[in-house]
């Protein structure tokens, strides 16, 4: 009986472990060079899009009251990735900096693929880990973020994004008509400042200065310096350069997803700087099965904002009656986001329909288009 239950739990979790099959692809690319370098990014972006077409949508919901003990294989997924990503990054730094068969462009290509994985999977898994109450899981999340030099994402996401999503105070809520190429440099600057200021404000409420050692930014900086130092020890300045390549690609992948998740969706301003509570309608969702396997149900984004500490296998699907739906999964939509005219053609009519459906009483949206005019505060 126990053995059959264990097997059933493993089988239900197995599709989410498909991401681990991408790890050998970067090693194959490094070993063979040439076209093989493209395997990791092509599989991540396009294979799962094809699989979405094959497997369709997943509209079923797990019991949100499922005991934590029944989720062991799901929890193992995110924790197991941490050492494997560490080995991938640093093992390849050691190997690639000594690989005579790879040109400079080839070495860059290998670490572009590494960044696709450390961003698409690694940062996404850190997002799952940082929301948990278990200290070990939160530490593992910090380690993943330090590997891409984006440690402040934890503070920004937990203290700023979840509180202010859909308002001008949330940098990563993409504004209506704001193209990704304007969004990206804006969030790189604003997110760092907003996360640091949020931690500084928390310390001030305890009558502590920002220089107090309880400020997590000291931990962030120490971990990031450690990651860079290890890259230097293994590959010299070339190793540091390759490390920076994968970190840059990973951050770009994260912010592409951030751009897609809330584009054009705003909470109603109630006056005196107050906004309505976050509702399922304030996140774009996608029910494509395979890309939710890859992204551990991140596309069930409305439920994540409703229950931020709910583990990914228990996130609930919200129907078109409750939340706006993307036409395709994140792999397709992030590619579209890189082409602003295409993105606007696909998404702007959906934003206008969303406005009419949920806020027909609002006739002037200029004040809500925060790319040019801030919402009332």
Image: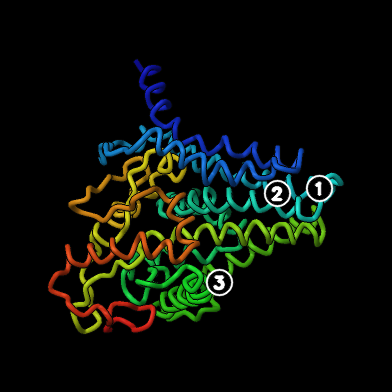
Which residue extends farthest top?
1
Of the two numbered discs 2 and 1 on the same chain, state the one appearing first in sequence: 1
Of the two numbered discs 1 and 3 on the same chain, state the one appearing first in sequence: 1
How many neighbours does mark 3 have within 10 angstroms: few (below 14), some (14-19), or many (20 or more)?
A: few
Q: Secondary structure at mark 2?
A: helix
Determine whether, in the image, residue 175 is placed left or right of residue 214.
Answer: left
Res 248 quadrant in image:
bottom right
Q: Tell me the distance, in whole angstroms, between the alpha carbons under discs 2 and 1.
A: 9 Å
How many neighbours does mark 2 have within 10 angstroms: few (below 14), some (14-19), or many (20 or more)?
A: many
Q: Secondary structure at mark 1?
A: loop
Residue 110, numbered circle: 2
Read off the residue under disc 3: 213
Q: Tell me the distance, in whole angstroms, between the alpha carbons under discs 1 and 3.
A: 44 Å
Rendered position, 341 above or below 112? below
Q: Residue at x 20, y 53 (%)?
A: 322
- Residue nearest the viewer, comparing 216 with 357: 357
Res 56 quadrant in image:
top left
């Amino acid at each position: 009986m126990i053995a059959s239950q264990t097997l059933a739990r493993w089988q239900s979790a197995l599709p989410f472990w498909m991401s681990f099959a991408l790890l050998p692809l970067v090693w194959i690319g490094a070993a063979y060079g040439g076209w093989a370098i493209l395997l990791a990014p092509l599989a991540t972006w396009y294979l799962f899009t094809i699989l979405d077409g094959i497997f369709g949508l997943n509209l079923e919901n797990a019991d949100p009251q499922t005991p934590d003990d029944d989720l062991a294989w799901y929890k193992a997924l995110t924790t197991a990735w941490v050492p494997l990503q560490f080995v991938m990054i640093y093992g390849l730094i050691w190997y690639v900096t000594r690989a005579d068969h790879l040109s400079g462009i080839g070495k860059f290509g290998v670490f572009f693929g590494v960044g696709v994985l450390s961003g698409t999977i690694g940062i996404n898994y850190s997002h799952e880990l940082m929301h948990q109450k278990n200290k070990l899981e939160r530490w593992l999340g910090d380690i993943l973020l330090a590997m891409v030099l984006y440690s402040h994402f934890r503070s920004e996401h937990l203290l700023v994004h979840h509180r202010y999503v859909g308002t001008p105070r949330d940098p990563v809520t993409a504004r209506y008509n704001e193209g990704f190429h304007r969004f990206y440099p804006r969030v790189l600057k604003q997110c760092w400042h907003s996360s640091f200021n949020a931690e500084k404000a928390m310390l001030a409420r305890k009558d502590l200065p920002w220089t107090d050692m309880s400020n997590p930014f000291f931990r962030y900086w120490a971990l990031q310096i450690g990651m860079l130092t290890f890259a230097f020890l293994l590959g010299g300045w070339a190793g540091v350069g390759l490390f920076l390549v994968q970190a840059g690609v990973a951050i770009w992948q994260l912010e592409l997803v951030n751009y897609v998740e809330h584009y054009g969706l705003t909470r109603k301003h109630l006056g005196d700087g107050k906004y309505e509570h976050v509702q399922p309608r304030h996140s774009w969702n996608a029910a494509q099965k395979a890309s939710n396997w890859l992204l551990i149900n991140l596309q069930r984004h409305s439920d994540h904002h409703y229950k931020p500490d709910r583990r990914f296998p228990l996130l609930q699907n919200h129907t078109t009656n409750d939340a706006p739906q993307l036409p395709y999964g994140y792999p397709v939509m992030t590619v579209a986001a890189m082409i602003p005219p295409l993105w606007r053609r696909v998404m702007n009519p959906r934003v206008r329909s969303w406005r009419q459906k949920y806020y027909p009483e609002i006739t002037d949206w200029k004040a809500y288009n925060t790319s040019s005019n801030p919402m009332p505060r």
